[in-house]
Image (cartoon, rainbow, N blue to C red):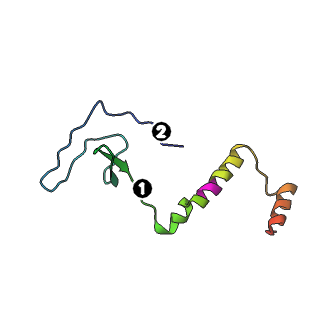
Amino acid sequence: MGLPARPLPPGPILITPDMRRRVTFPALPGIEPNQTLELVPDMDGSYRLVPIVTIPKNQLWAWSPEAMAVTAAALKDFNEDNTVEMDSAEGKAFLKKLGKS
């Protein structure tokens, strides 16, 4: 489940840092003004710019491997129509089994 493909610019783009090592990018798909970018060095000496999203500390739990696995399993069940109406007899039995009713 990756990001949708975006059209690439028509060839390389040259950028030159100013005296304070700042650079200005032309309008590029996927890069918004004031967006944080990570500069990632590659083994060949080149660099990649990777857009970064900041996650508030109190929401980091949702991105843990455990939470991601539980969410993926729930979405798989939903997509395979492996669900139960909570107001049905089966749903009420399920909640009772969980000790929720």
Q: Main secondary structure of the magenta part?
A: helix
Which of 64 and 52 lies nearest the eye of the viewer?
A: 64
Which of 97 and 38 lies nearest the eye of the viewer?
A: 38
Name which residue lies at 50% across and 69% down: 58
Name which residue lies at 31% across and 54% down: 34
Label 1, label 2: how many angstroms apart (C-alpha)?
Answer: 17 Å
Q: Give residue 85's position: percent from left, percent from top.
A: 79, 53
Residue topped by disc 1: 53
28, above or below 34, in the image: above
Amino acid on which the number 1 mark rests in the picture: Val
Mark 1 Cα shell of 10 Å, populated few (<14), some (14-19), many (≥20): few
Q: Give residue 99's position: percent from left, percent from top.
A: 81, 69
Residue topped by disc 2: 4
Quarter of the rendering occupied by the C terminus: bottom right
Q: Give residue 88's position: percent from left, percent from top.
A: 84, 55
* Mark 1 vs 2, N-terminal side: 2
> What span is in magenta?
67-71
Q: Are marks 1 and 2 in contact (CB under 8 Å)?
A: no
Element on which disc 2 rests = loop
